[in-house]
Every structure is written in C-alpha cells, then in structure tokens.
Image: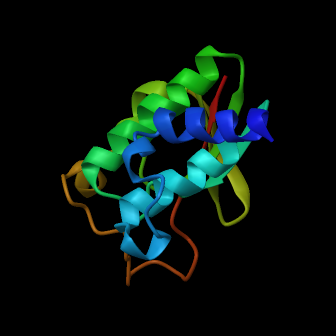
Amino acid sequence: RRADREAVRRALEQVGMSDRAKDSVDALSGGQHQRVLIARALAAEPELLIMDEPMAGVDLASQEVLARTLREQVDQGATVLLVLHELGPLEPLIDRAVVLREGCVTHDGPPPRALGQHALPGHDHVHPHAPAGAGPIRTGLLS
C-alpha cells in the first residue's frame, strides 16, 4: 500500500539509507545492514523499541547515525530500551542505566562512569580473569 511504502521511505531516510533502497542487502556493509534493520523496525512506527547491542560490529559513522535516529524517536515520544556493554555514542542519550552482575542489580540510575582500565579507549571486554558471564551488562532506557 501507498502508506506502507511511505513509512518505509521515511524510515530509510531517518537512518541515512534512502540512497541504497534498491540495493541488495548482500551489497551492504555491516553498519549499513544494521541501519536497514533498524529502519525496518521504524517503518512500523513503534511506541517501544527494544534493541540488543544495536552498535555491535557497527562503524563509528553508523553508530552516530543510529544515535541520532534513536534520539529523534525519543523526541517523538517513543521509548527505547537497550541492552549494551559499551555505551559509545549512545551515552549522552541514556537517562537511566540498570547494571547487572551475576543476575543481581548493582546499579539503577544515571549511567555510571567507567573506571580504571574500563575507561581506556579500545578497552577489550574479554576478561580471562573473570568467571564466565561475570562482566557487567548495562541496560539503558531512553525516555
């Protein structure tokens, strides 16, 4: 239907992919593919977006486009729930973080600041010294 095509056009425009609308998904980079998947969700004009690691494997330029797109969604009244290990470009957008460790809530409030080696650029989140699954999982809520 015309309304569906218009919703898809708007969603692709929001994520900066309207110029690739006719391209095969196989011709897209990882970041572009992620942006198309997010456009697919946006085309439905959801009130709630739940995303698991939307920035994983995505280049910085795509991360910035996705951060801007999510901010626009929040500004239009949507709620965005994110599961993240790295806040990256989304950090300024997150107003609440719930940090879990071993299934327990260790923080609920504004996003905590990274400390020590965790604050270093390029920090590797593979921790051989930690028990499997013991690393923090940050859940951000944009509203």
Residue reaching furthest to the left: 121
109 on left or right of 123: right
Q: Nearer the viewer, residue 48 or 24?
A: 24
Where 52 falls versus 24 (above or below)? above
Q: Nearer the viewer, residue 4 or 116?
A: 4
Q: Nearer the viewer, residue 55 or 17?
A: 17
Task: For residue 87, say whether it is visible.
Answer: yes
17 on left or right of 48: left
Colouring method of the image? rainbow
Q: Residue at x 65, y 50 (%)?
A: 40
Q: Position of residue 86 (x, y in %)?
A: 42, 52
In the rendered image, the quadrant that contains the N terminus is top right
Q: Residue at x 48, y 35 (%)?
A: 13
Q: Residue at x 48, y 69 (%)?
A: 25
Q: Position of residue 42 (x, y in %)?
A: 66, 40
Q: Position of residue 54 (x, y in %)?
A: 52, 54
Where 82 falls versus 124 (above or below)? above
Task: For residue 54, say whether it is visible.
Answer: no
In the rendered image, the quadrant that contains the C terminus is top right
Where 33 falls versus 116 (above or below)? below
Q: Residue at x 40, y 53 (%)?
A: 20
Q: Position of residue 113 (x, y in %)?
A: 38, 36
